[in-house]
Amino acid sequence: MVTLRRLPALLLILGLGLAQGLVLPFEGREGFRLAQAFAEGLKAPPPTLLALLLPNLPWQGSYDLVGGLYTKAGARLAQAATGADWVLLGREEERGLRLFLARKDGVKEGLFATPGLAWLWLQKEGLAPKWAPLPSPTQSEEALRALAQGQNPDPLHQSALDLKEGRGSGLLEGILPERLLLLWQGKLPPAYQAFALLSQGKREEALKLAETLLKGDVLEKTAAELVFRTLEDPRWKEAARTLAQAFPELPLAWEEVSFAAFQEGKGEEAKEALLQAIRLRPDSWLYWTNLGWALYLTGDLPRAIRASERAVALNPNATAYYNLGLFRAIYGDYLGAKAAYDRALRLDEGEDFQEALKDLEARGEPLALFFRAYLAERAGLEAKALYRAFLEAHPRHPASFAARRALARLERGGLALEVEKLTLIPGDLEARPFRSGEAVFPEVRLEGRPYLLRAPLESLLFREGKEVGRAEKPLGFPPLTAGLKEVAPALTLPEPGRYTLEVRYGEAKALVPLEVGPPSLARRLYALGLTPKDLSGTPLLTPKEALGPEGERLLLERTLEALKEAAPLATSPSLTAPLPKGPYRGKSVQEILKNPSPDLVRAFYEHVLENPEALGENDVVNAFVEWLLGP
């Protein structure tokens, strides 16, 4: 796949080359061949090396967080991360080849109809040698992509693979920038150190380092702002504004400025920051969504609607549709607002409707009150009072008919709760009758008409009319949910006797009588997920047997059988020699296996219940022997 004969000439070129710049693989169908041609012409290291060694940026999301590698921001951060004097990236597009040339002081971008024109541009930039033509690619795209993935490496690329594995830089010394080599050798630059401290939970150390990073290059300034933001340090706002001025190519910087402005109630600044971000990433649905809100805050409702419509055209999302619903409700557009809110509710996964309700609360228009009730009803919140308030304030409004119909629907509605089964493990088999000390998990089906209510799910335990246990669990579900299967909170059963388990949800409830017996070893093991097996790996009990009334008896009997069957195999000196200490001192393990007692097996299982790792994935025979031998 790789032409090794070219290596001496390549190394000669690299030795003569200045290694001050890097050409990264281009994006596109012929990206590697084009990048190789430019790298050869600029006497830069092979782009296939950079495919192996370009480091991720220190924060989660790497280049994706800043809009992608093949952008002005990505190019400039790649230059800072590698320590190269310049970095060249390219991207094949329908109209030609787009190049990004990043230096320490900034980045330039150009779109060229042909690679030859792009080469002339690099000559004017003083990067490419004058009068020299752009070299022709010599290897196939397939071969270069294989080399970039570490397949059939030549010595130079083997050095890159060795470097990634911590075996030294080898042939790469003097070819790649020192910062890049040191990074792969574990000597992290300050920006990477800051996030390493974060991952270790060293908050104060990370903040202190972030303070110094604010004075650094674009990578360090970006890292500082993200550290402040992650740790909710109030300095993140100032850092965001500083970053945007120093690094205007970074859409993330303008996004952060907009968040700072929103928090401070500065709608105009948020709008301007988002316009800057959109110029850099016109296809970002998030930026268009937030721009719609910023325009709303500045009073520009028509443009707010258009921005929100652009957001949902790019990516239908609940927030933008909620905003559209609000904007149209303000205008008095009942049908338009209803259509937007209906779409938002279908897209909402249960995270956005609360903010939408707060936005409506801040408005005084008639439809704002109506749609507060409309959203509350569909999200499972109290809506009757809101509908009544709307009808009282606006009895002749065109939406009053819909409000009266909604009230009637709510009056006819209700909640239903059914206990489907009681388990020891959620999602497992029905486990009645229960034993003392066990936790009961009620699995229930909930139904709401027209929608489920946002009320907690409660479990209560009664004995002779007296409450002896109670637990509560909040429910989370998306709007428009009418039915749900849930596990109610577990309750632990005390001593044997008769009990009543009550499960409540709003005004709905279900009562289940429970007859609680004495503890069972088999059931206690089952609840811990432990399955006793014989030497062949066959479980001693089926799940039904383990949970059944004879589970403990069967467990002890079959364990005794498994131990006796294994006794002839216990012939090693450690198993035939008398035990030097412990309650069975003087007896050998083999003798015990030949004639184990039920009490001894019971004691073993009590030990396992206290130390589940003693059984784990082991068979019961070896686990028993290890227990006898002791630590």
Image: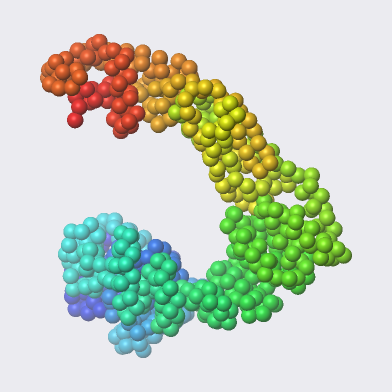
Residue nearer the viewer, 586 or 302: 586
Q: Position of residue 523 (x, y in %)?
A: 43, 24
Q: Is residue 527 left or right of residue 441?
A: left
Q: Is residue 546 above or below residue 373?
A: above
Q: Is residue 25 left or right of residue 449?
A: left
Kindly identify the residue that appears in the image at 67 percent across and 51 percent down.
380
Q: Is residue 404 above or below residue 269?
A: above
Residue 338 picture quarter: bottom right
Q: Position of residue 248 (x, y in %)?
A: 44, 81
Q: Is residue 432 left or right of residue 127?
A: right
Q: Position of residue 26 (x, y in %)?
A: 39, 70
Q: Position of residue 566 (x, y in %)?
A: 25, 15
Residue nearer the viewer, 469 or 606: 469
Q: How many labels sit on residues?
A: 0
Kindly identify the residue that appears in the image at 30 percent across and 18 percent down.
601
Q: Is residue 623 above or below residue 566?
A: below
- Location of the N terminus by quadrant is bottom left
